[in-house]
Image (cartoon, rainbow, N blue to C red):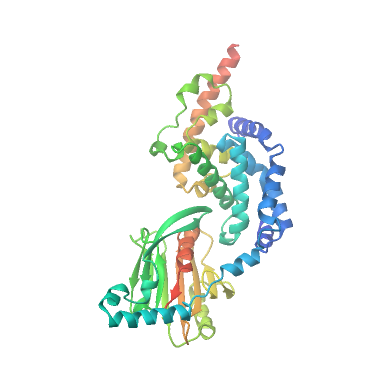
Amino acid sequence: MNEFDKRTKDELQKRTEQDTYGLQDEIWNALEKELFSEEQPKKGEVKKMKKKNRVVPIILTAAAALAIVFSLTTDTGMAFIKGIKDMFVPEKEIIQSIEGQDEPTDVHLNEGTNSEYVIYVDETRYKMIKGEEADIITTIEPLPDRYPEVSMEIKQVADTKPEDLVGKIEADLKKEFPDLRAVETVTEPVEGYWLHGTTGSEWDSKVVTAYVISNGKEGSYVITENYFLEAAEGHGARFHHMLKSFEIVE
Amino acid sequence: METKDWIHNIQQGDKEAFRAFYEAYADYAIRTASAITRNREMAKDAVQETFIRVYRQIGSYNSELPFEPWFYRILTNECLRLLKKESPLSKYEHPDLENEPSLAVESFDHLSDLYDTIQTLDDGHRIPLILKYVKGFTEKEIADILGLNHNTVKSRLFKARKRLKEQLDLIDKEERSQ
């Protein structure tokens, strides 16, 4: 460190010294009150409250079915409701935490193939491409070649339950991600099996995060997020938030 | 205990681990916030909110990435949010960031020491400088914290240090002539 650097460092050290007096205890007291007072729900309780059922409750489905029957019998009803999708608002604003900063984002309702699920997509950044075998959410504009793939694929495997499928998905991912972590079960952003791996620790090392969840019947959905290490708290966090809105509607 | 152990225990809701983590990180967090906000109360609010966010959002931290830039990114964002609230036209978002660092004209003649000089640089140059000299972050880490390109940080630090040296020479010259 040269003389100039040392002088600057010392000066900042000296001039910020006085602000630390007393403030450390003052802040801790406020934190203790905010985070650990008895009125606050414990962490586990909050998580439990947040846990939600991924399949639209049967009572809502039944109500929607009745509404559809009604809609088929009257012109007014026909105009009133077009399907289960109408149970969801087409557009809404959500607050998502990106890199520790709350960010208000407009998200739009998108239907999956054959309207079997819905998901709210941040259409200012991403688009949903529907395919015969899988739907893909990816950046609106393709990223330059130097960046690894950024996408979230949603695929239904109608005839295999998650517990029977997860082993195969794990084996497939291990081909490209030999250091794939052991499979875990999660309740957020969706409830099911969680797989995660990277190809290294460089900024552009590939990252994969996959979920294998029930489709509410005898099959599964496999949701695979692809991004790279430097984008983990950007695209990775945005995919995570979008996936929180995933709902099976059939 | 290492940071990764603290993080693991904090994720389990362990208050003692959070306290130990706080003791280890609070001092530099307060110094950094104090230097960025130039206001004791604002620094207090920024640091307090940062630790609350860390406790509540520790689950969103990617353990494959270094912890300190993540922590200081939250802290810096919080300081900037409070500064913006205080003065909606934050200089940090000024489009002229790539130009020469500017000093506030009205205070130029009265700068008596290095700290005052740092504090009159525009935010785009002042904040990288604070992160470098208070906590000793590398250019790459500063780029991560501020969401900037590495070369942008390099260029801003170069310009800010150049500006600072010029002012320091002036101060030294004045002192010698007295």
Q: Position of residue B80 (x, y in %)?
A: 51, 42
Task: Name the residue located 64 percent from the left edge and 32 percent from the top edge.
Answer: A10
Q: Residue furthest left?
A: A75
Task: Name the residue located 42 percent from the left edge and 79 percent from the top edge.
Answer: A63
* Closer-to-camera residue (A234/B152): A234
The N terminus of chain A lies in which quarter of the figure? Answer: top right
The C terminus of chain A lies in which quarter of the figure? Answer: bottom left
Q: Is residue B2 visible?
A: no
**In the rendered image, the vertical position of residue B151 relative to residue B100, given as above or below:** below
**In the rendered image, the vertical position of residue A110 relative to residue A164, given as above or below:** above
Q: Position of residue A14 (x, y in %)?
A: 66, 31
Q: Position of residue B138 (x, y in %)?
A: 56, 45
**In the rendered image, the vertical position of residue A166 relative to residue A180, given as above or below:** below
**In the rendered image, the vertical position of residue B19 relative to residue A192, given as above or below:** above
Q: Residue furthest top?
A: B178
Q: Is residue A233 left or right of residue A67?
A: right
Q: Position of residue B23 (x, y in %)?
A: 71, 48
Q: Is residue B40 visible?
A: yes
**Residue B155 picture quarter:** top left
**Residue B44 picture quarter:** top right
Q: Is residue B149 left or right of residue A10?
A: left
